[in-house]
Amino acid sequence: MSKIVFITGATAGIGAASARRFAGAGWNVIGTGRRRERLDALTAELGDAFRPIELDMRDVDGFAATLAGVGEVDLLLNNAGLAPSLTDFQESSLDAGLDVIQTNITGLAAMTRHLLPGLVARQGAIINLSSVAATYPYRGGAIYGATKAFVRQFSLDLRSDLHGTGVRVTSIEPGMVETEFTLVRNGGDREASDTLYADMNPLTGEDIAETIFWVATLPPHMNINTLELMPVNQSFAGFAVAREGVKS
């Protein structure tokens, strides 16, 4: 019997790469997203292995109806997330920041709570996508970093609550990953996104998907609590980046 993974934000980046990785390994994938055309494209690509659900993570009041009939799953991958523009908080849009909180915190918590009974019944696993921004501050990251710190701490405390159930909980905390994430954060500014990742060999969505798959398929008595990963050319001093071919 195939295992079932439920992936939020499956229409791009790490979510889409994870859907392909799990489907390719014989898992059944339930994937959510706001963009119907992206869900349809994944359905066409992955076939019967993929079940699409059009869902906005901010619409927590609609979760019960939208998720009716989903049933029990073996793995919840809380991947969906937003980031506001890199604007100093005192000059930022409050509405944009609240959208991020609603998606990254409220939506994640509500989704987890809705699917948790089935995960307990199957002694499944929960993998939450946090970020190195949960640990290392940077200018313009007040809202995003705070939401990812919530995800990290939520994961650890949830694991405490689930003690004795057999359910595993992991917080994955990547550094620079080149996906649509930065393009969206910069309001569609392709040049700004390309400049950020130029000549530094960032992680890819496929790199993170492979890491997620590894965590998910470890022996059931092993739990990875938190896992922080960065590209080699990123480090800790203000997220210093070494550009290839440029002497620092």
Image: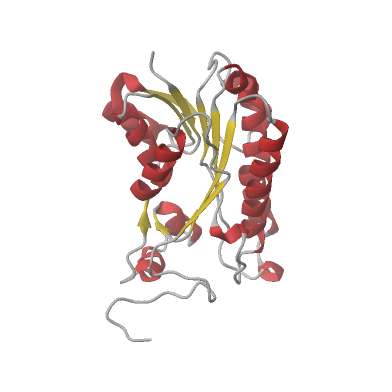
The image's colour scheme reads secondary structure
In the rendered view, does 185 fall on the left or right side of 142?
A: left
Q: How many marks?
A: 0
Where does residue 226 sit, x and y in percent of width and height? 56, 48
Where does residue 241 sit, x and y in percent of width and height? 42, 74
Where does residue 89 sit, x and y in percent of width and height? 68, 67
Residue at the location (39% across, 43% down)?
209
Residue at the location (32% across, 24% down)?
26
Where does residue 72 sit, x and y in percent of width and height? 54, 17
In the rendered image, the quadrant that contains the C terminus is: bottom left
* Image vertical order of residue 155 relative to residue 25, above or below: below
Residue at the location (50% across, 58% down)?
185
Quadrant in the picture for residue 121: top right
Farthest residue, direction bottom: 247
Front residue of 229 and 22: 229
Quadrant in the picture for residue 164: top right
Farthest residue, direction front: 221
* Image vertical order of residue 19 relative to residue 148, above or below: above
